[in-house]
Image: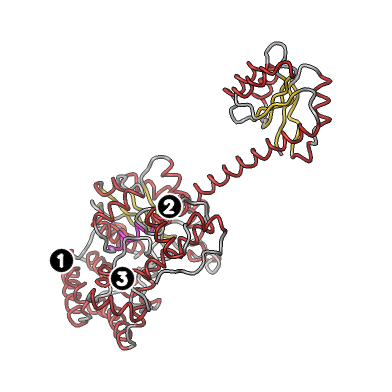
Amino acid sequence: MYRLLIVDDEPEIRLGLKLKIDAAGLGLELAGEASNGLEALELLERTPVDIVLTDMNMPLMDGVSFLEACRERHPDVRLVVITGYEDFRYARAALRHHAFDYLLKPVARDELAAVLANVTAELDGAREELEREARARWELSRYFKEMREHFVVRLVKGEPDRESAVLDRAARFGLEPWARREARFLSVGLRQRADAPWAAAERTPERFRLPFELLCREKEETSGAAGAAVVAFKDANYPGLIHFATTEDEAWLRGFAAELDELARGILGFGLAAGVGRPVTGFGQWKEGYLSALLAWNWSESGAAEDERRPADGQAALSADEIHVIERFLARGDLASFERAARQSLQAAFAASHSRFVRAIFQLYLLLEPLAHDARAPLGSAEQLWLRPEMALSFDTVDRAAGFLAGIAGKIAAARRREAEDGDAPLMDAVLRHIGENYMSDLNLTQIAEKFNYNPSYFSELFKSKVGKTFIQYLTEARMAQAVRLLEGTQLGLWDIAELTGFTSASYFSAKFKRMFGLSPSDYRQRGAGQPGQPVEG
C-alpha cells in the first residue's frame, strides 16, 4: 500500500477527489488532508507519505513554493499537480520542479485513476529496484565472505600461488595491508563441561557445533563493525574448531578470546579451549602462524598443568629445518627415514623437558594429519589427537610416541600405494575434487601437476586421456557452471560474477561465455534460467 496526501484549500474539492479515487483498487490509503502548503509540509514531517495530490492556487503558501520545499525536504515523494486551464503556467512550473504529472480542472475520474496508476507503477518499479540492489549487496557480501575465507584457508594451508596473484586477491578482499603487518591466529573450540554429568549424553560440544560457529561468526562481524581487523575461518581437518586471523595485537586477541568465552558460557553453557599462535609477518608465514595456534590449542586441551603450559603456549618444539627434512621423507614415502628422523627429534625434545616433548608430538601430528586427509587415509578415534589431546600426555616414552606417529605415517603410505596400484583414477578424482574446491583461485596446470607430484607435460597428457578434455577446457567449464548458477540465482553484476568464478575480467568472462553458449551472459539472464543451450566450444 502507498500513502496518499491530498492538498487543496477547498474541503468540497478534497472530498470530491477522495470519492473519485478507487483507493483499494490502486493499492492506496489516505495519509491525510491539508488545506495549504504549510499544513502539508507539517504533515509530511510527521507521517510517511508516498504520493501528494496538490492544487497549485492556494493561500499562505502557493503550489510553486510548496513544490520547491517538498522537492528539497522530501525528494522521494511523488507529486501530482492539479491546475486550471487558465493557470497553465502552473503546469510548466510543476514540470520544472519535477512533478510526476499534472491534471487540468475539472478532474475526470478516469484521468485521475490513470495518473495514480502510473505513479504506483513507478513506485513499484523503484521498490523492486531497491530490493534488487539490497539483495545484490547481500549476495555479494555473502559470496565475498565465502571467497575471502577460502583465500585465507589457502594461505594458512600453504597452498602454492604466484606472489602477484596472492597480492591481487588480497587487495580484492581488503587484506593487502595484512601482507606487511604482524598477523596472529586464534583457534577455539568448546570445552566439555565437567560440572554437568547428568547431561553428558545430551550436552556434548559436538551437538553445539553449528550454534558455536554462528556465535563466532557474529563475534567476527561485531568486532569488524567496531573497526577491528579480524577474519574467521574453518578448516575441514578440524570440524569442531573455529579459527581467527587478525592484525590486532596480542592483548586485543586475548581480550577477544575472553569475550567469546563469556558469550559461549552464557549462551551455550560451555567454556572455550583457546590457543593463541605466535605472531608472523607476510602471507608466506601464515601457515606457520596458524599451526602455532593449533599447537597452542592442543596444548591447552592436553590437561597439562598451568605452570607447564604457560611458557610453552604457541611455541614450536621442532625447528623449521627439522620439519622440512621430515616432510621430504614423507613425500618420498620413505617410512624408515621418517621414523628415524622423528625419533631423533622426539629424543632431543624428551631430553630437554616433558613439555617440549609433548609439543613435539603435537607438532609432528599436525604435520601428518592433513597428509592423511589428502591421501584419504581415515584415522580412527584413537588416532585423532585433536579430539583426544590428553593422549599426548600418556606417551611417557619416545618409543610410544614414535610408534603412534609411525602408525599414522604407515597408513598414509599404504593409502598412496593402493592408489598407485589402482591406477590413476583415484588420483584423478583427487585432482578434480581439488579443482572443484579451488576453481575461483589462480589455478594452472603446472601448479597442480607439482602438487600431485607429476611432471607437467606427462600430467597434461594424463589429464586429457582420463577426463576426455584438456585441463584448461575442464577448468573453464567448472568456472562456467558456477557462473551460470550465479546468473540464474542472483542479481550480481558481471564484474562480481567474473571475480567469484576465477575469470580475470568481466569482458574476458563475457567473451568466453558467448563462445561457449552462443549468447552473452546478459542475454542469457534476460531469457531466463535454464535456457543457456549446450556448450558450442570444443
Vertical placement of 246 versus 450: above or below? Answer: above
Asked if disc 1 and disc 2 are in contact, CB closer than 8 Å, the reply is no
Q: Residue at x 53, y 59 (%)?
A: 488
Comes first in the chain, label 2 or label 3:
2
| 157 within the magenta span | yes
Rendering coords of residue 191 (x, y %): 43, 61
The mark nearer the N terminus, 1 or 2, is 2
Tag shown at residue 392: 3
Quarter of the rendering containing residue 380:
bottom left
- Quadrant in the rendering for residue 306: bottom left
In the picture, measured across the screen, residue 191 lies left or right of residue 73, that is left
Classify mark 2: residues with Cα within 10 Å, few (<14), some (14-19) or many (20+). Answer: some
Q: Which secondary structure, mark 2?
A: helix
The amino acid pointed to by label 1 is Asp
Residue at image coords 46%, 69%: 535
| Relative to 401, residue 301 above or below | above
Q: Nearer the viewer, residue 165 or 178?
A: 165
Task: Judge from the rendering whether residue 477 lies leftward or rightward of residue 103; answer left or right.
Answer: left
Q: Nearer the viewer, mark 3 or mark 1?
A: 1
Residue 111 visible in the displayed image: yes
Q: Nearer the viewer, residue 79 or 87?
A: 87
Q: Report how far apart the C-alphas of labels 3 and 1 lie in the structure.
A: 23 Å
Q: Which residue corresponds to mark 2?
A: 144
Specify the amino acid type for callout 2: Phe
Disc number for residue 321: 1
Q: Report the Cα–Cα distance between label 1 and label 2.
A: 37 Å
* Contact (Cβ within 8 Å) of mark 2 with mark 3: no
Relative image position of residue 102 (x, y in whole percent) = 69, 26
